[in-house]
Amino acid sequence: MSPKKQKTAYQNPWPLWHQLILMCWRLTWLICCRWTPKFLNPWRILILKLFGAKLSGLPFVHSSARIQIPWNLKMEHRACLGERANVYSLGRIEILEGATVAQEAYLCTGSHDLSDPTLQLIVKKITIETHAFIAVRAMIMPGVNIGKNGVVGAMSVVTKDVPPDQIVAGNPARKIGKRSLT
């Protein structure tokens, strides 16, 4: 479900029924998953699937990960969301096979149209391709694609696509090397 057009900057872009389901999601995650140890990952995966997340194989989702809208999340086999990772999934987020999102990384699919007085919500998909690595506290902005085997350094802010096998770091993130897997 996409957000609706706002009439004012103070209007919530999500319909009431959507907000109620999200409240149910947050409460369910808090009660059923937030406290669970690492070995109960299959239980967390089941809860995410019940709320519409598209999960294939056996991805890993840490119990302290924060997922805004689970039905906008897709994860493949051995994809990983680390401790306190933030998945601000107002739009689609895909984390493909073997990709890792480390501790406290922030994947943000939402922004605002600053040229519009109502500050319309804008959502753009984020894709983290196979075997990519997002290091601790990195921020991935809306519409960014991290290529296969790409690496984002710690505390980096990524505003543009990262090509396959490229290592980027900094704010804004810039190429600092090439990843060679032997």
Image (spheres, rainbow, N blue to C red):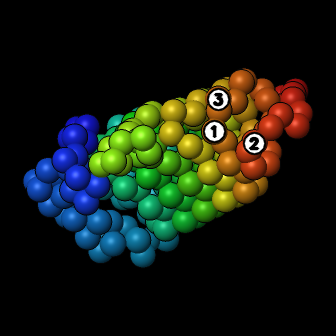
Q: In the image, residue 86 lies at what x, y percent?
A: 50, 58
Q: Is residue 160 left or right of residue 90?
A: right
Q: In the image, residue 37 lies at what x, y percent?
A: 49, 71
Circle 1 residue: 159
Name the quadrant containing residue 176. top right
Name which residue type carries label 2.
Ala
Q: Is residue 89 visible?
A: yes
Q: Is residue 114 left or right of residue 146?
A: left
Q: Residues within 10 Å of mark 2 (few under 14, many from 20)?
A: many
Please state, as top left, top right, bottom left or bottom right, where the N terminus lies in the image: top left
Name which residue type carries label 1.
Thr
Residue located 83% across and 34% down the image? 175
Q: In the image, residue 111 lies at what x, y percent?
A: 44, 46
Circle 2 residue: 173
Q: Is residue 135 visible?
A: no
Q: CA distance from mark 1 to mark 3?
A: 7 Å
Residue located 55% across and 59% down the image? 85
Circle 3 residue: 161
Q: Earlier in the sequence, mark 2 or mark 3?
A: 3
Q: Earlier in the sequence, mark 2 or mark 1?
A: 1
Residue located 33% across and 72% down the image? 30
Name which residue type carries label 3.
Asp
User: Marks 2 and 1: CB-CB under 8 Å?
Assistant: yes
Q: CA distance from mark 2 to mark 3?
A: 10 Å
Please state, as top left, top right, bottom left or bottom right, where the C terminus lies in the image: top right
Instruction: Please tell me whether mark 1 or mark 3 is closer to you in this view.
Output: 1
